[in-house]
Image (tube, rainbow, N blue to C red):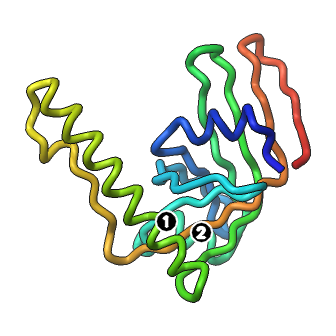
Amino acid sequence: MINKNIKALIESREFISVATSDPEARPNAAPKFLLKVEDDHIYLVDYVIGRTFRNLQVNPRISLSFLDSATLMGYQVNGKVEIIDSGKEYATVLKELRDKQIDLSIKRVIEGVTKGKSHKAYEVSIPEQFVILKVKAEEIVQIQPSGTFKTEKV
């Protein structure tokens, strides 16, 4: 299981950086919408038209990265992806996604209004062609500000 401190750090963000590679080992990094963290799985939303999706179809290995700005500690979560695009789990996650979309949109519109900005810049929309990336965390790497690493198997 992902320990509770790392889980809290992941859940505190709306997007997380995802790195994949294609069959020729060309890297691709892109932010993905974070849906939830459950046990040793991280659920992300991805367009089916992008390089990340195409890469994962041939190479299901993935690396997620983020920074804890309070401690300047960097993290990588490395693992394997299952692409969920139909079935019971997809239907369940789709409902959770719609609920999260509504909550996030409300939060962002209120934030925009209080800052005097147009609410359209703060609305969240879910793409029509998307899949859920169910990432099975296998390893968590902690990168300390000093440059030292600590690796933990999940």
**Position of 36 compared to 33: left or right?**
right
Whether residue 150 is situated above or below residue 146 in the rendered picture: below
Density class for disc 1 (Cα within 10 Å; few <14, some 14-19, many ≥20) is some
Q: Quadrant of residue 41?
A: bottom right
Q: CA distance from mark 2 to mark 1?
A: 6 Å
- The image's mark for residue 51 is 1
Residue 44 locus on image (x, y percent): 54, 59
* Residue sitting at x 63%, y 16%: 72
Residue 115 at x, y = what percent?
15, 24
Q: Secondary structure at mark 2?
A: helix
The residue singled out by tag 2 in the image is 55
Q: What's the residue at 61%, 57% (across, down)?
A: 26
Which residue is the extreme one toward the bottom?
87
Using a 10 Å C-alpha cutoff, classify the residue at mark 2 as few (fewer than 14 neighbours), some (14 to 19) or many (20 or more).
many
Q: Is residue 50 left or right of residue 67?
A: left
Q: Nearer the viewer, residue 147 or 101?
A: 101
Q: Residue at x 73, y 32 (%)?
A: 5
Q: Pointers 2 and 1 in contact (CB under 8 A)?
A: yes
